[in-house]
Image (cartoon, helix red, strand yellow):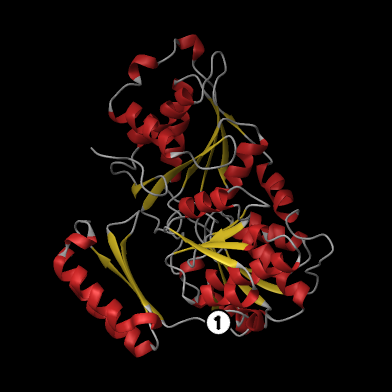
Amino acid sequence: MGKLFGTDGIRGEANRYPMNAEVAFGVGRAIAHLFKKGGHRAVVIIGKDTRLSGYMLESSLEAGVTSMGGHPYLVGVLPTPGIAFATQSMRADAGVVISASHNPFQDNGIKIFGGDGYKLTDAEEETIEDLILNDKLNDLLPLAKDIGKASRLEGVNGRYIVFLKNTFPRNLSMEGMKIVLDTANGATYKVAPDAFTELGADVEVIHKTPNGININDKCGSQHTDDLKKKVVETGAAMGLAFDGDGDRLIAVDEKGREITGDQILIICANMLKNDGKLKNDLLVSTVMSNLGIRVACKKYGFKYHASKVGDRYVLEDMLKLGSVIGGEEAGHMIFLDHHTTGDGIIAALQLVAAMVRKGKPLSELARMMDIFPQKLINVDVKSKPDITKVPKLAAAIKQIEKELGEEGRVLVRYSGTQNMCRVMVEGPSDTVTEKYCRSLADIVKEELG
């Protein structure tokens, strides 16, 4: 059956292996077993986004944890970073998120946090896989008298909102600022509007009525057309779009133009530097970030490090190198002074703080970073062989890199969560970038599609 965990937990089509009730039940049992110590029963927080399949997986996880003698606490719909917060706040042993992030509703996933609010280590995930895939859990079941019991945890939304508000500087105010939020019919649909309203903003919300199948559907951080229109139509200062589980942010300026995660990172890192809070003068992003981020870092006097793609690798490098800010171009941003994991609402609050402090519109702040022409094409693939071992593709990449020289770069990599190859080219002009990217994407389709 192979591995269960990918780069961001377990993910797949709901009600099909590995995203079915049986695996979720096994994960619940494995977590309860992994985190029990002596006579201590594992306390596990379980939360979810708004997908229809969340009910099925929540019940299975709950049954798995209780069957192994653990105590699950159900918090219902809450953003992924909210579950990390609740796990820490409750001093629980683990927190489980049922979500497939920005994927369409038919997918779902399981992400696990330890009691410290950080995602599990590779070794812990491997232990869980071993317990499930090698059928080791049946021999470990407690007697009937030692089965655990589940509880529903009330008031977590309120606690999380207070936590969020405390990340916004007390000496600043959003009073009179009109902000449009796109909650993607997902996990932020309650907490984000409440947090911004309580901080004084004049808030308008779109895509705020989840029905189980409309999460991320032409809305949220990956589909900002509706948000752009609404910002311009209402004369708002900005628009803020979250993804289905609330760990990503993409912003729209007052003119209706999208601001990337890279631009937000530069704006916020510069604010931290001016405040003397940019630890080690370092910003961490990934190899997928636009070349412009390196140029901007140099311009504003701080260092830059590119990690592998994936928020876990960004975080790993941040901790190793002593950085307090890092993230991905796609909008996943980590502010370690405030939280242990990426949080779209915290990122949004820091961006608003930078705007209020500078007294400048977002369109002006966005110009702090020039974006090099970039083209990204996602190609569905049937297999994922080592790219250097696909002769035609490897040769084409080498040739294009030679032709671009210092004026661009090529990055061809597989998605960690989908059967997809991402082809990204940056170059001196839109025409050149488009031409090279399409030629590589055609080769990927021909060789691997």
For residue 73, what is the image quadrant? top right
Q: Badge 1: few (under 14), some or many (20 or more) residues near its Cα, within 10 Å?
A: many
Q: Position of residue 365 (x, y in %)?
A: 65, 79
Residue at 60% across / 47% down in the picture?
A: 340
Residue at label 1?
257
Q: Report the front residue among 248 and 108.
A: 248
Query: Looking at the image, which residue is at 58% across and 66% down?
Result: 303
Left or right: residue 96 compared with residue 84: left
* Residue 76 place in picture, x, y as percent: 56, 42
Question: What residue lies at 64% left-to-right and 72% top-to-bottom?
Answer: 301
SS of the residue under disc 1: loop
Q: Position of residue 72 (x, y in %)?
A: 54, 29
Q: Is residue 358 above or below residue 141?
A: below
Horizontally, residue 66 falls left or right of residue 169, namely left
Please name whichever residue, 416 or 154, is drawn nearer the observer in this view of the structure: 416
- Residue 203 in sight: no
Which quarter of the figure is the N terminus placed in? top left
| Quarter of the figure with the C terminus | bottom left
Q: Would residue 24 be seen by someone viewing this image from the given angle?
A: yes
Instruction: Inspect the image, locate mark 1, and give the three-letter code of the amino acid beneath it.
Output: Arg
Front residue of 118/90: it is 118
Above or below 56: residue 297? below
Say which residue appears at 46% left-offset and 71% top-offset: 223
